[in-house]
Image: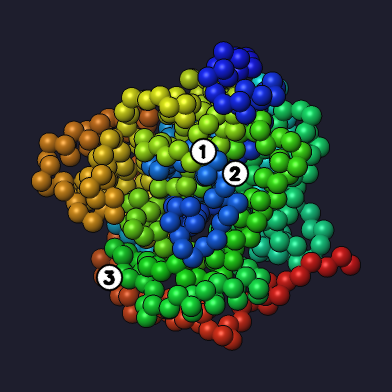
């Protein structure tokens, strides 16, 4: 089922690689919630500071065209666990979102009723945790789960230990203790959630340093509600002032205002604390001498929140963000560190998906692949080792509206081409991502043959996997729809601009439940 890396392979490597301890590799999987492709210093941000995550990229392989399997959390996470695209496992929206006629309760006045979807991770699937456990690994989960109600928690899907994972997708009670999480005891008032999850992970690693482990650290950060400490707010507020504060921070996207500036000091502090937490775990590996035998995977579950929720960040030059069908909604930081390979900072531009991480981890660990399970993922080990892979299509399916301004649509990416099919009017957008990564020019009308070919391939695949579909809402009222759009432009947009300015004022005061939160031991 698994084996040691043969010495004949190591002979072609560096001396450091050749002296690798002969034991099965540990795996540390770090998943950040809602982290955008431009939310790291190493991916282009000059505002956020992320030295610990940058170190993973510097010492590993950077997939410059890494994608989440969905534009929102639960579907993407289900794909990480199963190696299947969302249309195949049928968790196509964040679990808890309204669908069907219940969508009308939100008074959104949309043309379609969002598709029904599966609300629990299927127990018929062999999750990556179960595969690792079957191979003799001790399995650990900490943080956000959001893949079903009780009975479908991490411990029900292959994790020996679950710290903080339950049905909720946001940090209930906020980022400072006391929080409201039945899977994570409050121990110190004011304790930071990200740091607590990191310390729990570090403790697990230390307790199992003499075994082989698969540790999955799944931060609630940087999901809203965004919160930070006064010191970090001050640091990034001053940084914004020094850089010069733009007169406006938003523009109107197709359905909602969208943030154009990375200048939110609260969000920046939340990002830095999450990076501090990553550093705790990485330092633990090093202190225990495990860093040379631990594969580290780092990614996010969907794009940065530029519209909806907390309107926190900008993904420019990529269009959109969480919830959107464009690159800003699905393009992610995607790093894999394999310490015994000399791949420091190598960049690979082959398009990859979250579904690929399941077979890749198995392959790197020397565990037999499960092709009947991870149907939509391929092992990236050949790419990491300098070989090539054949071109293949990637698929996304989101027959919902969501909270962030995206439209019900499905996507196929093949080579440089990306086609988006919209379910409201059955229209298509076609982009040449090689020439137009910002998706500003829809060239479907000028490339009808390519558009038709990609649409037919997408449609055939959706039928093959029995994808769930939205339905026309016979109660649709165009007048109410236009009134809502007018309210967004006349009220929401200006309020967001004012909120942005208020957060950058010298006398900014946040909610009392987190400003100045300090750890106490009484």
The spot of residue 167 in percent (x, y) is 62, 48
Q: Which residue is mark 2?
A: 30
Residue closest to the eye, 76 or 202: 202
Image marks 2 and 3: residues in contact by CB distance under 8 Å: no
Which residue is depicted at the point 43% across and 78% down?
244
User: In the structure shown, which secondary structural element does the residue marked by tag 1 occupy?
Assistant: loop
User: In the structure shown, which secondary structural element does the residue marked by tag 2 occupy?
Assistant: strand
Q: Residue furthest right?
A: 522
Local packing at callout 3 (Cα closer than 10 Å; few below 14, some 14-19, many 20+) is: few
Q: Quadrant of the N terminus?
A: top right
Alpha carbon distance from label 3 to label 1: 52 Å
The spot of residue 484 in percent (x, y) is 34, 71
Residue closest to the eye, 210 or 51: 51
Q: Which residue is mark 3?
A: 482
> Which one is earlier in the sequence, the residue at label 3 or at label 1?
1
Q: Which residue is mark 1?
A: 344
Q: Is residue 492 visible?
A: no
User: In the structure shown, which secondary structural element does the residue marked by tag 3 occupy?
Assistant: helix
Q: Is residue 161 above or below residue 182?
A: above
> Which one is earlier in the sequence, the residue at label 2 or at label 3?
2
């Amino acid at each position: 089922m698994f084996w040691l890396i043969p010495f004949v392979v190591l002979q072609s490597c560096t001396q450091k690689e050749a002296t690798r301890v002969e034991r099965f590799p540990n795996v540390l999987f770090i998943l950040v919630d809602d982290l955008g492709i431009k939310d790291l210093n190493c991916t282009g941000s000059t505002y956020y500071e992320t030295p610990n995550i940058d170190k993973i990229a510097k010492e590993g392989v950077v997939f410059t065209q890494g994608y989440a399997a969905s534009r929102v959390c639960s579907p993407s996470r289900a794909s990480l666990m199963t190696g299947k695209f969302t249309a195949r496992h049928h968790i196509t929206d964040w679990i808890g979102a309204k669908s069907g006629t219940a969508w009308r309760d939100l008074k959104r006045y949309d043309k379609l009723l969002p598709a029904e979807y599966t609300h629990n991770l299927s127990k018929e699937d062999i999750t990556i945790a179960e595969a690792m456990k079957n191979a003799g690994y001790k399995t650990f989960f900490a943080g956000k789960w959001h893949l079903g109600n009780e009975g479908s928690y991490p411990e029900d899907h292959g994790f020996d230990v679950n710290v903080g994972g339950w049905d909720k997708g946001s940090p209930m009670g906020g980022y400072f203790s006391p929080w409201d999480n039945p899977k994570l005891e409050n121990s110190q008032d004011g304790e930071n959630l990200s740091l607590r999850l990191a310390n729990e992970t570090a403790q697990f690693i230390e307790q199992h340093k003499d075994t082989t482990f698969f540790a999955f650290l799944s931060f609630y950060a940087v999901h809203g509600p965004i919160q930070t400490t006064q010191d970090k707010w001050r640091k990034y507020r001053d940084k914004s002032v020094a850089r010069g504060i733009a007169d406006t921070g938003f523009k109107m996207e197709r359905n909602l205002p969208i943030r154009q500036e990375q200048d939110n000091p609260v969000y920046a502090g939340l990002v830095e604390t999450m990076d501090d937490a990553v550093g705790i775990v990485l330092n633990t590996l090093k202190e225990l001498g495990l860093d040379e035998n631990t594969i580290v995977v780092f990614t996010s579950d969907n794009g940065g929140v530029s519209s909806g929720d907390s309107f926190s960040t900008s993904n420019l030059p990529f269009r959109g963000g969480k919830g959107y069908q464009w690159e800003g909604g699905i393009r992610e930081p995607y790093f894999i560190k394999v310490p015994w390979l000399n791949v420091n900072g190598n960049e690979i531009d082959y398009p990859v998906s979250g579904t690929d991480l399941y077979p890749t981890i198995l392959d790197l660990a020397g565990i037999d692949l499960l092709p009947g399970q991870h149907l939509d993922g391929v092992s990236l080990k050949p790419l990491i080792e300098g070989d090539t892979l054949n071109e293949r299509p990637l698929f996304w399916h989101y027959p919902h509206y969501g909270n962030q301004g995206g439209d019900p649509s499905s996507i196929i990416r093949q080579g440089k081409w990306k086609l988006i099919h919209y379910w409201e009017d059955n229209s298509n957008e076609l982009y040449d991502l090689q020439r137009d990564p910002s998706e500003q020019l829809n060239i479907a009308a000028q490339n009808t043959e390519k558009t038709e070919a990609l649409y037919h391939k997408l449609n055939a695949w959706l039928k093959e996997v029995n994808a769930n579909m939205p339905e026309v809402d016979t109660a649709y009222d165009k007048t109410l729809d236009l009134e809502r759009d007018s309210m967004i432009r006349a009220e929401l947009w200006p309020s967001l601009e004012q909120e942005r300015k208020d957060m950058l004022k010298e006398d900014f005061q946040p909610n009392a439940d987190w400003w100045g939160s300090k750890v106490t031991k009484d």
